[in-house]
Image (cartoon, rainbow, N blue to C red):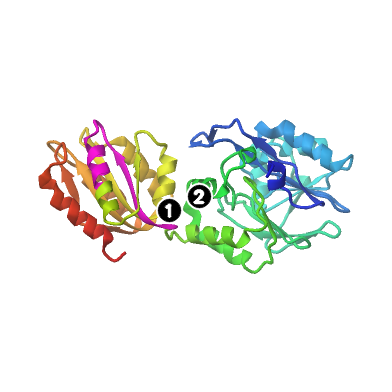
């Protein structure tokens, strides 16, 4: 399926966004094989542009818009989200079409001057929950979605064709032209971009459940048509902080390789006992990948060394990211390594104690250098503890 087919909505609702296959780091921190900046135009008696795109996609966006309008002028620009990857071209579009009105939440109106020198207040139409805007045969209904994942966010339901323009909700990493299965890019995106705001996503899903939705049109990634229930079901699970799958995720931070060897041997023992185990070297993989896996699996065993009387930084980085992303509802095992004064377990426990609904399995396994036969009983006990009540 071509990428244009993946974002097609209808004859009257046209994708005018930009695909960016060259982007390697999103938001200056998340590795990705490209990204799409989605925008749409609704063609009716009056025309409405649904968001703009990042400055990297400016040329493509305006070319697509010009082709779709065929000489017409947009009457409205609906601003669902002010983040620069979607709002960078508001000023330029407003300058090109001085009669075009801007539509958004009151908070959006307050944020516009933060990003643009032009005074757009006289052209701004503030909307609130369930306000509507008629374009002719199409009617837009505005639904507030604060903190999904910025405070000004709203989503828009088009009542005639039953399209939910979902802002960053249901978005994915990855360029459209890659034509890859969307779910892995979606979970990577969700847990790192939106994951902290589960309660707010749940509130939006409750509102969405009252709508008859035939199409979900997000601001990143493919348009969804035939998989609506699956997509919404995934978001319901993820935003409830429930695990997506059964298994043990084992991220480790090893300095000279001894902790790594111990973890990989333990993973083999767990697999032999029937567990699904995913290991990850935090010194080699990006922390965002580890965040995703930690949220996906129902259990996690973390393993790291003591370093300068503290915790080896790659593990500190992971636990910091999990804390700020609101990680919760998991059973965690701990393996530490320290030759003369091990404190890694204490430092890891401090992070875990600051999170909600975390159960730490006992015993904590303490290695002194390399794993020895005398350590086997501790590993067996931890394995049993991780299986209990599962």
Viewer can see residue 324:
no
Q: Residue at horizontal 54%, vertical 32%?
A: 24
- Which residue sits furthest front? 272
Q: Circle 1 sits on which residue?
A: 296
**Mark toward the start of the polypeptide (2 vs 1):** 2
| Number of marks in picture | 2
For numbered disc 2, what is the local secondary structure?
A: helix
List x then y, in percent, for residue 167.
64, 50
Examine the rendered structure and indicate whether residue 195 appears above or below residue 252: below
Q: Which residue is mark 2?
A: 187
Check if mark 2's residue and mark 1's residue have beta carbons within 8 Å: yes
Q: Residue at x 56, y 42 (%)?
A: 173
- Image location of residue 203, percent across then percent down: 56, 63
Task: Name the foreground residue: 110 vs 206.
Answer: 206
**Range drawn in magenta:** 244-266
From the viewer's side, name the closer residue of 201 and 82.
201
């Amino acid at each position: 399926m071509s990428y244009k087919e993946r974002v097609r909505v209808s004859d009257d609702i046209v994708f005018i966004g930009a695909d960016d296959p060259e982007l390697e780091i999103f938001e200056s921190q998340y590795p990705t094989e490209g990204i799409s900046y989605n925008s749409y135009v609704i063609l009716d008696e009056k025309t409405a542009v649904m968001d703009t795109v990042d400055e990297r996609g400016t040329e493509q966006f305006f070319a697509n818009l010009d082709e779709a309008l065929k000489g017409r002028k947009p009457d409205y620009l609906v601003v669902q989200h002010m983040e620069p990857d979607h709002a960078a071209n508001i000023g330029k579009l407003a300058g090109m079409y001085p009669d075009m009105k801007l539509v958004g939440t009151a908070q959006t109106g307050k944020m516009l001057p933060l990003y643009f020198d032009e005074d757009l207040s006289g052209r701004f139409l503030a909307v609130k929950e369930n306000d509507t805007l008629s374009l002719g045969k199409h009617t837009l209904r505005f639904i507030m979605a604060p903190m999904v994942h910025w405070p000004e966010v709203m989503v828009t339901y088009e009542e005639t064709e039953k399209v939910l323009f979902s802002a960053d909700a249901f978005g994915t990493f990855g360029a459209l032209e890659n034509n890859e299965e969307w779910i892995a890019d979606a979970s990577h995106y969700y847990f790192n971009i939106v994951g902290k705001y589960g309660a707010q996503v749940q509130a939006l899903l409750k509102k969405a459940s009252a709508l008859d939705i035939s199409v979900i049109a997000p601001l990143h990634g493919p348009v969804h048509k035939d998989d609506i229930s699956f997509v919404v079901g995934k978001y319901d699970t993820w935003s409830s902080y429930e695990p997506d799958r059964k298994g043990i995720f084992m991220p480790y931070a090893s300095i000279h390789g001894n902790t790594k060897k111990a973890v990989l041997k333990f993973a083999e023992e767990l697999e032999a006992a029937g567990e699904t185990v995913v290991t990850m070297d935090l010194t080699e993989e990006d922390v965002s990948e580890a965040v995703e896996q930690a949220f996906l699996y129902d259990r996690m065993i973390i393993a790291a060394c003591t370093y300068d009387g503290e915790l080896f930084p790659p593990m500190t980085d992971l636990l910091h990211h999990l804390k700020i992303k609101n990680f919760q509802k998991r059973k965690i095992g701990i393996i530490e390594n320290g030759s003369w004064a091990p404190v890694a377990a204490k430092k890891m426990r401090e992070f875990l104690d600051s999170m909600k609904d975390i159960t730490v399995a006992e015993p904590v396994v303490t290695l002194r250098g390399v794993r020895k036969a005398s350590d086997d009983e501790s590993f067996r006990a931890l394995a049993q503890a991780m299986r209990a009540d599962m």
